[in-house]
Amino acid sequence: METDVLNGDATAPKAAQLEIRLVSPDFELMRLLREVLAEIREPQCSLVAGPENSPRMPESEADLWLWDYEPGNRLPPTMRFQSSRHLFLVNAKHLNEFRLAIAPTEANIILKPVSRNTLRASVGLAVSVHWERMTSAHTLREDRDDLLQCLIETSLLLQNYDHERTTFLARAVHDFRAPLTAVNGYCGLVRGEHLGPLNDAQKEVVERMQLSARRLSRMASAMFELSVGRHVKRTPHLLANEIRKTLDQALHEVMPFASEKRISVAADLAPCEFPLYFEMGQIEQVLINLLDNACKFTPRGGTVEVFGYAYFWERRSARTMAWQAAERRNANQDEPNAYRIDIRDSGAPIPGEQLKRIFEEYVSYDGGSDRSGGGLGLALAHMIMSQHGGHIWAENTAFGPQFSLVLPKRQAQTINTNHNSSIGENK
């Protein structure tokens, strides 16, 4: 069981806070909810999270409950039910069973697997409605209740449509990847002159074709991973790997794009004195996406710089990890507990209001020099770093826009256990 004060002062009186309880064993869901609540400025919210059978889970009433439903779960019989105070996370295939078993027709349902935007909208609405009821007169309550119920039903329909769209998109992109792989292979055959000699002009054209095919393949893979990532929980296969070797492979992939724009790419990685455990292919994909993004927005003849160094990651810092505000270290020390990589370019700054949203899946991209939308590559990078228990963020520096990531130092005995225990960083 975990208790966090997500915003405001933990010593504030109870009446000034909204107490939220999540009943779920899902660590990823707990983390996602903390991120969402950390963005709510008013009211102050405290979060209690734990599994249904946790002996430490308080039985008293909370202001807002979130129930992660699985077949066989039951609500406590002593709990007074008010639909506006309860959100149920239910898999679409369990909807009928859920309604027959425990839920009245007015239940506020969020379909699983839940996206960050859906959770933020649903929880934000529930928090604002309940807070208004606690702090204002009860005039027009029935009308508001009717309106809220219409919104709940509309939200459920939209979630169903979104799930159907995502499923269709995943299947379509999966079909796209096969011909793209074939095109890339055929370009390799022609480029290697296995089908006959080529002159210099022909070689250049084939190289450009192969570069475009690879970028299309990466985009298709990103779309597929993001679509499937909602439905399939994936734990990375963590092994001790060399970050320098991983970066070198990523640089090899993006150098043709950088060379085409005459972009100077420099890398300076300090050696890591402790082993880093990560899935090499996944972190390589993160670095490719970040480097590709940097080259995309760097003007012709510009520069991209990569720095790597051991780093003390203050996970309680609101600047880098607002949802981790209540974590405690085992000891007060500032020794490196992570490895950090910064990728900086000489392109246009990122709009300040978009810095926190640039890694979201549905942030639009306007093209040109506008960096307000990050595209699929950044969304996929964020998902991979979350799966690794690391962190990724963007900021504007005096030398240009910078994207940074941190990989945590891990205890060897925690590798490839369940995800909740596998993020055993030394602190």
Image (spheres, rainbow, N blue to C red):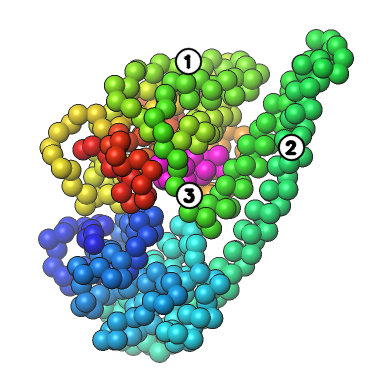
Q: How far across and how far down the image is residue 207, in percent?
A: 74, 20
Residue 145 lies left or right of residue 309; in this view the side is right
Q: Where is residue 155 in the image (x, y as percent from the top left)?
A: 52, 72
**Residue 387 part of the magenta-drawn span:** yes
Q: Mark 1 to mark 2: distance in Å?
A: 31 Å
Question: Which of 149 and 114 lies nearest the eye of the viewer?
Answer: 114
The type of residue carrying mark 3 is Arg
What amino acid is found at the position of numbered circle 1 in the picture? Ala
Among the two numbered marks 3 and 2 on one chain, the one whose residue lies closer to the N terminus: 2
Element at badge 1? Answer: strand
Q: Which residue is drawn at 43% across and 72% down?
A: 70
What residue lies at 26% left-to-right and 86% top-to-bottom? Answer: 78
Alpha-carbon span between mark 1 and mark 3: 33 Å
Residue 424 location, quadrant:
top left
Q: Where is residue 248 in the image (x, y as percent from the top left)?
A: 50, 20
Q: What element carries label 3?
A: loop
For the residue pair 141 and 37, the one nearer the viewer reads as 37
Q: In which quarter of the image is residue 397?
A: top left
The residue drawn where x is 54% and y is 30% is: 288
Label 1 sits on residue: 266
Mark-to-mark CA distance, 3 and 2 = 25 Å
In the image, the segment drawn in magenta is 376-388
Crowd around label 2: few <14 · some 14–19 · many ≥20 (10 Å): many
Which residue type carries mark 2?
Answer: Leu
Quick one: quadrant of the C terminus? Answer: top left
List the residue tagged with mark 2: 180
Residue picked out by circle 3: 234
